Image (cartoon, rainbow, N blue to C red):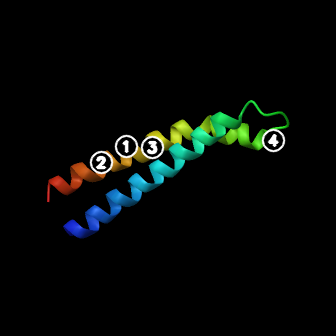
Amino acid sequence: MSGAEAGFVISLIASVITIVDATKKVYNAAKDAKGQPEAFRQIAARLPLVIEILRSLKRGHRRSTRRL
């Protein structure tokens, strides 16, 4: 994988992390609102795991590109 491709993958993962973090913050701000659908609560409970998986992928990708 070229340096440009590696940079693109890392940027893409970082962007997804940013989107998921922002989504979690918006949910946390609104979670006290009455009538919140159960689906939102279930998704919010899983967001920290999704964020950690993406961060792990980003770290692993960086390590693999350093070896090249």
Badge 1 crowding class, 10 Å Cα cut-off, few under 14, some 14 to 19, many 20 or more, is few
Q: CA distance from mark 2 to mark 3?
A: 11 Å
Q: Amino acid at mark 1?
A: Ser
Q: Which mark is residue 21?
A: none
In this rendering, would 27 be left or right of 8? right
Q: Determine which residue is flagged by label 1.
A: 56
Residue 43 placement (x, y as % from top left): 66, 42
Q: Amino acid at mark 3?
A: Ile
- Say if mark 2 contacts mark 3, CB within 8 Å: no
The label nearer to you, 4 versus 3, is: 4
Q: Determine which residue is flagged by label 4.
A: 37
Q: CA distance from mark 1 to mark 3?
A: 5 Å
- Residue 31 vertical position relative to residue 54 in the rendered view, above or below: above
Q: CA distance from mark 4 to mark 1?
A: 30 Å
- Say if mark 2 contacts mark 1, CB within 8 Å: yes
Residue 39 placement (x, y as % from top left): 76, 43
Q: Determine which residue is flagged by label 2.
A: 60
- Mark 4 or mark 3: whose residue is earlier in sequence: 4
- Residue 34 vertical position relative to residue 50 in the rendered view, above or below: above
Badge 3 crowding class, 10 Å Cα cut-off, few under 14, some 14 to 19, many 20 or more, is few
Report if residue 42 is visible in the image: yes
- Mark 4 or mark 1: whose residue is earlier in sequence: 4
- Mark 4 or mark 2: whose residue is earlier in sequence: 4
Q: CA distance from mark 2 to mark 1?
A: 6 Å
> SS of the residue at dot 4?
loop
Q: Determine which residue is flagged by label 3.
A: 53
